[in-house]
Amino acid sequence: MSALTVRVVVLVPALAALLGLVVARRPDGKVSRLVAQAGSLVTLAAALVQLLLTHGSGHVVHVGLMAPLPAGELRIPLQLQVSAPAALIAVVVAVVGWAVHAFAAWYLRDDDRYGVFAATVSLFCAGMLLVVQSADLVLTLVGWEVMGWCSYLLIGHWSRKETARRAAHKAFLVTRLADVGFVLGVVLLAAHTGSTAYPAVMAAFSGQPTTLPMVLLLVGVLGKSAMVPFHDWLPDAMEGPTPASALIHAATMVAAGTFVLAQLFDLFAASDAARWVLALSTAVTMVWSAMLAFGQSDLKRLLAYSTLSQVALMLSALAVAPPHDGPGAGVLHLYSHAFFKALLFLAIGWLAVGMGGTAAASLRGGLRGHLFIRPAMFVGLLSLAGVPPLVGFVSKEHVLSAAERGAAQGEARAWLVLVAALLTVVLTAAYCMRAWLVLDDVRNADVARHDADSAPASVRTAVTVLAVLTVVGGLVVLTPLVHTGGHVGWLLALVSVLLVVGAALAVRSRAADGDPAARLVGSRATSFDRGFGVDRLYVAAVARPVLALARLVVFLDREVVDAYVRGTATATRWGGTGAQRAHRAERAASGLTWVVAGVVAVTLAGVLLW
């Protein structure tokens, strides 16, 4: 039964994507909606069955997706895995995928390319589920690349806009560059092992150094997860439709690297250099992006920078957790982040439909009078800020506790992450309070808006389910199923709660005209929106040198290498021209004279030599 369910979980969304493309051009979009939502529901049902079958079991069962690929001495078994952690995250991806499909069917109801969008979302979910259920490096790489391609399509869905096209190209180029490292890491692991199966790779590298392949894999993870120095593409990805943002930010691509590293945690934990690289990148990313989130003039971009910070937090747990603890703390935060971040994106998108945009100025006071959006946004922001007992608090405290245990063992990188994480707690509470003050501004509550109940029942159901999971997920659903290898440090938890409350009250006291950023950021808001000029830094440090090198290569190719070829051609042309002139008709007599003279010379030479 488990073998069947794991195949269904992976194959159904892929088939829904294929069928969705076939019917995508139908003008009414009803068939596309039916295919997308039916596929997501079947996937969710299969994932839930798999979770029930694996609940309480610590065993991992391997199932062949298809016949092994013949590759000479390299064994490529193409196996999937059935385990409790993989089953749980498959449920999370399926829940978010279903919610996104339900929301997109309403949000993009007037979009003439909705069918293509829905098919791409299904394929995106199939790629993520393949990564989650994979027990083979080749299958992981296939799912990884499918997600990268789909992210390009989803970000650039509104391709009639120049900004959307630019954002899609930027995301594609940055993640493609980083994926070179991921592919090379997979090649090194497979070449050393002689197999692409996870168990064989883990056994082959047991007790051996893994620095180079793990650092290369980590480069790909940092690119897909948008960590520094690859971070700037993700905020620009907000040019895509809100359902696409919810999917990319909540439960798919940016979180996929966490699960891949968790699968290879024993190898990763053995590489001190790789863990240092990850610790440095995540520490910088979580503080930098949380600071930028506070000053954003667009609340959708605020959530984007929040994603950077939270993904950095989940990855940092893998960098500092003691090896015997395992990757549970980081994976737990992956689960919880999927719930509250999907909830926040769908809620802000729902609100924007009635308010005419996602800019803070457009959304001021927009929550007033909304029976569904207001409580959903409230619990989402509380969970993001880490307020107990919501799911965000539970997972964040496990990450902090993992860093604390690493610091207690004298690990310098654990101290770095712990300090950065505590500072991030303060900044996260600050921008969450700022977002709430803007959205719930009483002084602007009488602005005209659409009735929140105008959304269909499917949208209200999706938001309600995500809100419920955000409230109870940490206590009921997640904690018993994910072994974090440790416990929550209650003293540290109390400190973080006090930091959250203090930061929120400080921001509340600085509110000016309903938006604290107006006073605390002021005229520097444009710099926050531009990410403090990182785009210009990319152009100066990367784009211009690469273009200059390209121009040099073109010059050398044309003026040096091609010069020899052109010189040969010129010499041949000149020689031919000279011969042609020497044998032209008007000089025939002169030529005949030279022929006669040659014959006489040869005859004389023959007589004399004889």
Image: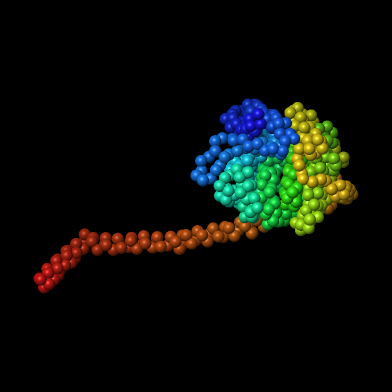
Question: In the displayed structure, does residue 137 sit left or right of residue 379?
Answer: left
Rendering quarter of residue 460:
top right
Residue 440, horizontal then vertical, whole percent:
84, 40
**Residue at (58% x, 58% y) in the render:** 546
Residue 281: in sight, yes or no?
A: no
Viewer-nearest residue: 157 or 303: 303
Residue 241, horizontal then vertical, whole percent:
68, 39
**Residue at (63% x, 34% y) in the render:** 10
Rendering quarter of residue 435:
top right
Residue 264, horizontal then vertical, whole percent:
66, 47
For residue 377, above or below residue 580: above
Question: In the displayed structure, does residue 255 sit left or right of residue 449?
Answer: left
For residue 604, above or below residue 168: below
Residue 436, horizontal then vertical, whole percent:
83, 42
**Residue at (82% x, 33% y) in the render:** 370
Q: How many marks?
A: 0
For residue 363, above or below residue 212: above
For residue 300, above or below residue 547: above
Question: In the displayed structure, does residue 554 sit left or right of residue 605?
Answer: right
Question: In the displayed structure, does residue 541 sit left or right of residue 289?
Answer: left
Q: Please identify the quadrant where the C terminus is shown.
A: bottom left
